[in-house]
Amino acid sequence: MSENKIYFTLDEDFQMHRGGFLLNPTIAYETWGELNNQKDNAVFIFTGLSPSSHAASSKKDPREGWWEGIIGPKKSIDTEKFFVICMNSLGSCFGSTGPSSVNPKTNDKYRMTFPILSLEDIARAGMKLINHLQIESLHTNVGPSIGGMSSIAFELLFPGFTKNLILISTGPHSISFTIALRSLQREMIYSDPEWNNGNYHDSQLPLKGMKLARKLGMMTYRSSDEWLERFSREKISKTSINSILSPSFQIESYLDHNADKFTSSFDPNAYLYLSKASDLFDACDYGNSLDDSINKISASRVGIIGVKSDFLFPVYQQRQLVDIFKRSGKLVEYLELNSIQGHDSFLVDIDKFSSAIKSFFKIF
Amino acid sequence: MSENKIYFTLDEDFQMHRGGFLLNPTIAYETWGELNNQKDNAVFIFTGLSPSSHAASSKKDPREGWWEGIIGPKKSIDTEKFFVICMNSLGSCFGSTGPSSVNPKTNDKYRMTFPILSLEDIARAGMKLINHLQIESLHTNVGPSIGGMSSIAFELLFPGFTKNLILISTGPHSISFTIALRSLQREMIYSDPEWNNGNYHDSQLPLKGMKLARKLGMMTYRSSDEWLERFSREKISKTSINSILSPSFQIESYLDHNADKFTSSFDPNAYLYLSKASDLFDACDYGNSLDDSINKISASRVGIIGVKSDFLFPVYQQRQLVDIFKRSGKLVEYLELNSIQGHDSFLVDIDKFSSAIKSFFKIF
């Protein structure tokens, strides 16, 4: 099975937002559909913290993508109409240059010498890719979760480029609680002695720390009501327990299996960099106030989706964006969904999200 | 400064609820006020996971107690009227026998050879203490947080003993999300190599694991709204960051300082045992259904407090208890408070809790 992934290597150095630079970084991406002659049907997707560019299957790579239910022929993001691009974020570990990539200057992996990563770097990498593809405007910029903050960063850095903006389960920045959760996840990784200041061997990853971080992630990406509905207090075994260290409840073994899958596929240093970048981003940096900053976004139509059970980017953050966009005279559609899957609903409750995104494209 | 704490050592072995026994365990406790001649003014307090028996100051020990605003002369739990007893839970580390105590049989610390701890053991230890104090009935049994589940265990094990029951920010058992959080906290501790299967030295505690566990505890004992109100996105320093490992936000340094205080005072193994006991308790074990179990509680008046921002023991759990108690014909008072401090509100929002508890004692 060959991959659909394309690698684009910049023929120049890449200046990082908070200082430092990358020598000729590579950006991995995938596309679906065709750019039309008018070059006005491009839809760009910024991803959340962990996904790769493989948002949907294709003839070349039939594996199910992370947004398979949303992207495809006649789906909400219709690849018969649109040229859809999804990029692996700069700083990640699925083809784009990140801490696990080799620094051409030293021939060693960057690891913790990778410069501070900002969501602005991901947005600028997106623009480099868009230029490379000879796209002169975006029909729609789509950002779910942290990708939504990258989309906002893109709009603030490159006003006038995008016609329509879709922001999903995101906000203008992260709230205190979400920062605290991410900070703790990072500490779990670097408290693991195997992390070794980032100099772990591929055969000896900081698996315990990654597992803890992923479990906390999974618990908080979803909602308490979902766990209650799925697992209640179901036990693993009816027999009495022998050790207080053994898990007793189904939810414990579910989180354990889920974490094992993740820890074997994601680079720990990349996780640290992307997580910190998510804490640091603040749309307020672009003006005297949040209103002032958001008013600098020029896309004329905005679709926003919030989920009531999301406590990482709570609905008051999406409502706040809606209010500001409305005050600035944009056409704004806001949908607040009752999905039970919390922050991750956009990946799971495909029925509701499919209709919601479809309704946006009807007015775009 | 001398302590008010009293140590009572059983002259018999103590059979544990899930098997095994303790040789002549010790129970540490404190009392305030005097038992009257009729012996009908005893108020017993079961504590949450981490507090000691020092719930309030006294002449002998003037240090502020963990419920200083609630217990005292003319306070909500009025020590001029009542003989108030607070016990350090069996399995804890503030004087009562726990994993850090020496097993008389081996002359070594119990550590992980301590038998499985259940909240029923804490309830039974409470009854041993009550017998020792020659108290023949409880005026009121008070349980906040996990102490509320110990209070329920006491009521189920010793029906007919208690007249009034106060349950605060608790439930008949822990929900999936709360189990998952505790399970992860335990994993943080035993993932720390310094934990060493429980055989750590006092000079080399699993501080990293304890710190992670305490931070997650602190974050989830409170509420997202409280963190937002107190810290918003306040930075530690206005200067640019040098390393992605350094904390950047005030909430990160607050949680760090708070965790340091805790980790130096609580025994890691005791934490593991008490945490697991909290997961395992289920009032449903005492009947064919939750209703059937709770109907076995004979206290005739019940005061229940829930806090809307608590997501460890959400208000639907307190409402469920209220409904069952009402159906069984008890006099039930329920107060649902708007405190912003989440599960910990009973320790922090003393104004609201003081009035609430005072109102219960008016009808008791």
Image (spheres, coloured by chain):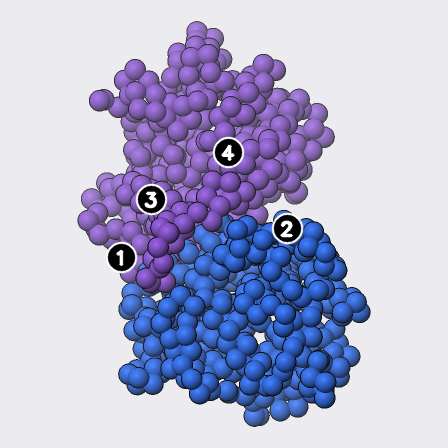
Chain colours: A purple, B blue
Indicate the amino acid at tag 1. Glu
Rate crowding at label 2 as few (under 14), some (14 to 19) or many (20 or more) other CA atoms within 10 Å. Answer: some
Residue B132 % position (x, y):
55, 85
Q: Judge whether residue B53 can be spotted in this image.
A: no
Query: What residue is at 31 percent from the left and 54 percent from the top?
Result: A208
**Circle 3 Cα neighbour tier, 10 Å, few/some/many (<14 / 14–19 / ≥20):** few
The reply to whether callout 2 and callout 3 are in contact (CB within 8 Å) is no
- What residue is rendered at 25% in x and 54% in y? A199
Q: Chain of mark 4?
A: A
Read off the residue under disc 2.
B320
Residues at marks 4 and 1 touching, judged by CB atoms closer than 8 Å: no
Which secondary structure, mark 1? helix
Q: Residues within 10 Å of mark 4 (few under 14, many from 20)?
A: many
Q: CA distance from mark 1 to mark 3?
A: 21 Å
Nearer the observer, B123 or B110: B123
Q: Which residue is mark 1?
A: A194
Q: Position of residue B187 (x, y in %)?
A: 37, 58
On the image, the x and y values in percent for residue A86 come to 40, 26
Task: For marks 4 and 1, give the CA distance.
Answer: 33 Å
Tally the marks: 4
- Compared with A58, A93 (above or below) is below
Type of amino acid at the residue the image marks with label 3? His
Residue under label 3, please give it: A257
